[in-house]
Image: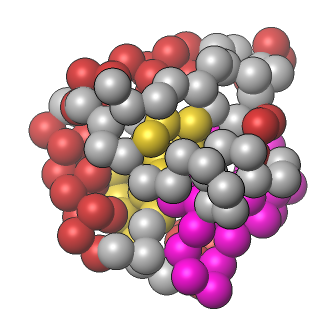
Amino acid sequence: MRVFIIDDEWLIAYTLELILRDNGFDATGFTVVDDLLRNLIIAKPAALITDIDMGTVNGVQLAETVSVLLPTCKILFLSGRVDGAGGPGESGCQHWPFLAKPVHTSVLLDTLNSLLSISDSGFDRNIPSTQAS
């Protein structure tokens, strides 16, 4: 299954890409939103893992754009900010599942697999968020 990852920190995007590839996903990491959007419609990823606060880019706005361009693409937020701006309380973020960095690989994979198992027709975007423990 194809998954896109975007994070403004290249090491995080690249590491997540490797983890997902090692676990059977066709994963591609991005650090530039324009690059992701150029590839979105052609590649049609099943899911997007995105940071919320990426400097000049707001992950919630990106998620909304992706949802319009590719409604079948599931969104998962992965962010180091758990409260305040850039955290799960960010306006609009409540519509998608959220994982706090750092997150154990098994939690990431379980959450992603659960998200992907939801049929498009029954997709309500309301999978519970998980905080890092």
- Residue at screen point 83% across, 49% down: 92
In the depicted structure, whether residue 114 falls above or below residue 54: above
Q: Which residue is at the far left?
A: 22
Q: What residue appears at the point 64 percent right and 78 percent down from the top-left corner?
A: 57
Image quadrant containing the C terminus: top left
Residue 55 part of the magenta-drawn span: yes
**Image side of residue 5 versus residue 44, left or right:** left
Q: Locate residue 114, reporting x and y percent.
A: 50, 16
| Res 44 visible | no
Which residue is more in the foreground, 46 or 110? 110
Query: Relative to residue 85, is residue 7 drawn left or right?
Result: left
- Residue 111 picture quarter: top left
Is 45 located above or below residue 69 in the figure?
Answer: above
Q: Where on the picture, by quarter, is residue 59?
A: bottom right
Residue positioned 66% across, 20% down in the render = 127
Direction front: furthest residue: 84
| Quarter of the rendering containing residue 124 | top right
Horizontal relation, residue 12 to residue 120: left or right? left
Residue segment shown in magenta: 50-75
Q: Is residue 67 magenta?
A: yes
How many numbered discs? 0
Q: Residue at x 48, y 36 (%)?
A: 99
Across and down, in percent, residue 91 comes to 84, 53
Instruction: Give the colour scheme shown.
Output: secondary structure
Nearest the viewer among 2 and 4 is 4
Residue 57's place in the image compared with 22, above or below, is: below
Residue 98 visible, this angle: yes
Residue 86, x across and y down, in percent: 63, 60
Quarter holding the N terminus is: top left
Residue 52 location (% of width, % of height):
60, 60
